[in-house]
Image: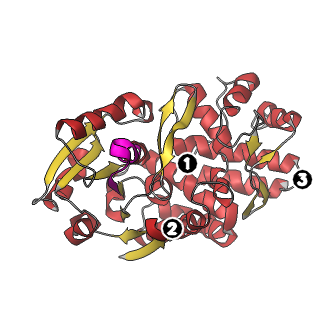
Amino acid sequence: MKTLQVELGKRSYPIYIGSDLLNKSDIFKSHIKSKQVIIVSNVIIAPLYLNKILNNLLEYEVQTVILPDGEQFKTLEYVTQIFDKLLTNKFGRDSTLIALGGGVIGDMGGFAAACYQRGIAFLQIPTTLLAQVDSSVGGKTGVNHPLGKNMIGAFYQPQCVIADADVLNTLDNRQLSAGLAEVIKYGLIRDIVFFEWLENNVSKLLDRDKQALAYAIEQSCINKAEIVSEDETETGVRATLNLGHTFGHAIETGIGYGNYLHGEAVAIGTCQAADLSRRLGWLTDVDVNRIIALFKKCNLPTIPPTQLNTNQFLELMAVDKKNVNGKIRLILLNKLGSATLPIEVENELIVQTLENYGKN
């Protein structure tokens, strides 16, 4: 087991990375302060791993909430089911919530923990690659709204993140590929050596080579932890983690939550951001082709859906947390391995990417 630390003063916490971590009861017990524990999971993950967690908590008073699986259920309506269970069972402010699942469960569970009695402790147990390398780390929690993804939420840090690589054995190939989209992001925005390693090791990752996956998870978490420690509430460098997300969120919202996995939409959005960076003269054709080729090797989509026209894209991109005074602000690449902070780009150039990228 390796332990990384997210340094946030009194809110600092460890990320545990390794194998067989779901059977290590001492990890759980060291982060749970009272007898009341609620586990939030979904219908896919609970049958696989819930009993393992329960075996670590035999002396605790444990309640469970099992939600449907999918981005389309990441709403206030379903978070209310968590509140209902907490209130019905008279959970106090010293209780602990365990989020057992992918990014949707982590976001919803964390948001419920942030809100219930103005904040209870919670643990993140991410069960997808995307959640292990990205969404479980950094304290972003929230739900979607029909008009915009993740527009309702809070920054709220967990007590710890338990990233057990063994759970990836039951992850389907599509979800594995979706997670690699966020892994690639770290190489593009700040770690060119990692990006080059990914170019050379994609086949190992897709084949679920344990050493390769462990390295990719660790390097991603190192990058994420460093960024979050420097900028917890996304007023500066943390915004670079949103490379491709303004385009990607527009796709998810416009096509309907759940039709594209988050990582799939981010892969397309990152290719669009790379195309726009090329139009600004910051990336070469060779750079953009390398980016597209790596996503394709990961079996990820790189072309935006035809269902969205340019005006629809622009309307959806206008609903974004990085925007200021109604102006679209984007994270772009000034070179491979280096991202910009949010910047305004001439609308004409954005339109050129929306109308031309992937159509020639």
3D distance between C-alphas at marks 2 and 1: 36 Å
Q: At which x and y percent is residue 238? A: 63, 58
Q: Dot 2 surroundings within 10 Å: few (below 14), some, or many (20 or more)?
A: some
> Mark 2 = which residue?
8
Q: At which x and y percent is residue 44? A: 29, 41
Q: At which x and y percent is residue 60? A: 13, 57
Q: Which amino acid, mark 3?
A: Gly
> Mark 3 = which residue?
281
Instruction: Tell me the quarter of the picture where residue 316 sits.
Output: top right
Which is more N-terminal, label 1 or label 2? 2
Specify whether residue 336 is in view.
Answer: yes
Q: Which amino acid, mark 2?
A: Leu
Q: Taking 266 as reference, is 281 left or right? A: right
Question: Mark 3 or mark 1: which is in front?
Answer: 3
3D distance between C-alphas at marks 2 and 3: 37 Å
Q: Nearer the viewer, residue 129 or 111?
A: 111
Q: Which amino acid, mark 1?
A: Asn
Which is more N-terminal, label 1 or label 3? 3
